[in-house]
Amino acid sequence: IVLGFLATLAYGGSQWRVMFLWSVLPGALLALFSQLAMPESPRFLAQKGMAPAAEANAFKLWGRTEQAAEELQGILTEAKVTAAEAQSTSRTSSVFETKYRKVLVMCVMMFVFQQMSGVNSIVF
């Protein structure tokens, strides 16, 4: 924030966009570089069917301990069960079934009322 104030003074006047840019830049760079250095989740890799990569990343994150191996086995087992269930029951059209109709109508109406009320002009 101090860098933002100094940049505003350097460019003269009240250029708040420059101040905002300087205050956002460190956080954005930190997020970018930390995402590049972070390994993928073992659970995500197991769900995608990449068990060897899941094992490598699990041991990289948790170390080669007995507890890490047990956790990894649980994740791999859960991923197999989830994949089997997803193949038999997953459909996009299930959202429009009668048991979800009331919730779906409420969600859509909340969106419509929010847009029609003009609250976005106040909040944003």
Image (cartoon, rainbow, N blue to C red):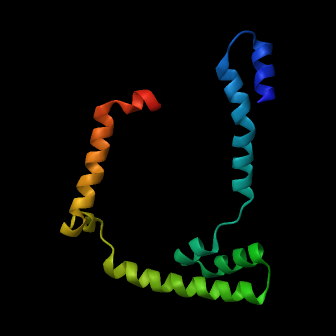
Q: Residue at x 71, y 9 (%)?
A: 13
Q: Residue at x 39, y 82 (%)?
A: 85
Query: From the image, which quarter does the N terminus lie in?
Result: top right
Side of 49 relative to 11 (left or right): left
Q: Place residue 97 in its image quadrant.
A: bottom left
The location of residue 37, given as percent across then percent down, is 75, 58
- The residue nearer to you, when weighing 97 against 118, is 118
Q: Does 89 appear above or below 1?
A: below
Q: Place residue 40 in its image quadrant.
A: bottom right
- The residue nearer to you, when weighing 102 against 58, is 102
Side of 102 relative to 6 (left or right): left
Side of 51 relative to 27 (left or right): left
Q: Place residue 35 in its image quadrant.
A: bottom right
Side of 1 relative to 55 (left or right): right
The location of residue 45, given as percent across then percent down, is 59, 73
Q: Does 74 appear above or below 18?
A: below
Q: Residue at x 79, y 79 (%)?
A: 63
Q: Residue at x 23, y 54 (%)?
A: 105
The location of residue 31, given as percent across then percent down, is 70, 48
The location of residue 57, given as percent across then percent down, is 71, 74
**Outermost residue, left side:** 98
Q: Does 94 appear above or below 30?
A: below
- The residue nearer to you, when weighing 36 against 2, is 2
